[in-house]
Amino acid sequence: MDSAALREMQAPLKEKYRAEPDAAVVTLRAHGELAGDGIACRVETGRALVEAGLHPATGGSGLDACSGDMLLEALVACAGVTLKAVATAIDFKLRGGTVSAEGDLDFRGTLGVDRAAPVGFREIRLHFTLDTDEPEEKRQNLLRLTERYCVVLQTLRNAPPTAADIAVEA
């Protein structure tokens, strides 16, 4: 896809969202099942079921997906798609490349070993390696725009209010 085709595809959406801002608000959903004897949650991904379980650092077997890994995978997916869309929009010549993310966790917090240890990632690093001949200035602009428009990255950096509740099946 080239920048003209991308603009043509997105133009009616942008016009609609300018005229009707509420139409741009979409609620995404995820669903999981707590069935089974193991300590796991079956998550519907839209294409398959993924069974998430304990990370080996918390006693898991390593056979189930780890939700921390899934978070990083979501970041990589979003950042990769965003970078490709931005590259297309700004006519950045990109032959290929890779996206990777890594994050540091202190499992003492998760296991309740040390109340002062944080639960969650201490730091996350996102890295792009690009196959391109574009100059440094254009590469930095691509990165700046990718960071600006990546939904998962922006959500991690600017965490929204998040609520949790519990109900009992009727």
Image (tube, rainbow, N blue to C red):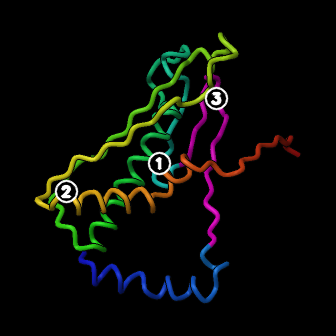
In the image, the segment drawn in magenta is 25-44
Disc 2, SS: helix
Q: Is residue 75 left or right of residue 29?
A: left
Q: Which residue is mark 3?
A: 36
x and y percent of residue 70 in the render? 47, 39
Q: CA distance from mark 1 to mark 2?
A: 40 Å
Q: CA distance from mark 2 to mark 3?
A: 52 Å
Q: Are marks 2 and 3 in contact (CB under 8 Å)?
A: no
Of the image marks 2 and 3, the number of the one nearer the N terminus: 3
Q: Are marks 3 and 1 in contact (CB under 8 Å)?
A: no
- The quadrant holding residue 11 is bottom left
- Residue flagged by tag 3: what amino acid is it? Gly
Disc 1, SS: loop
* Residue 35 located within the stretch drawn in magenta: yes
Of the image marks 3 and 1, the number of the one nearer the N terminus: 3
Which residue is painted at 56% across and 18% down in the image? 107
Q: Residue furthest top?
A: 113
Q: Is residue 113 left or right of residue 52?
A: right
Q: Is residue 151 left or right of residue 114?
A: left
Q: Which residue is mark 2?
A: 136
Dominant SS type (magenta): loop
x and y percent of residue 28 in the render? 61, 60
Whether 44 is drawn above or below 9: the answer is above
Q: Which residue is mark 1?
A: 48
x and y percent of residue 17 in the render? 57, 82
- Residue flagged by tag 1: what amino acid is it? Ala
Of the image marks 1 and 2, the number of the one nearer the N terminus: 1
How many residues crowd around disc 2 within 10 Å: few (fewer than 14), some, or many (20 or more)? few
Q: Residue furthest front?
A: 137
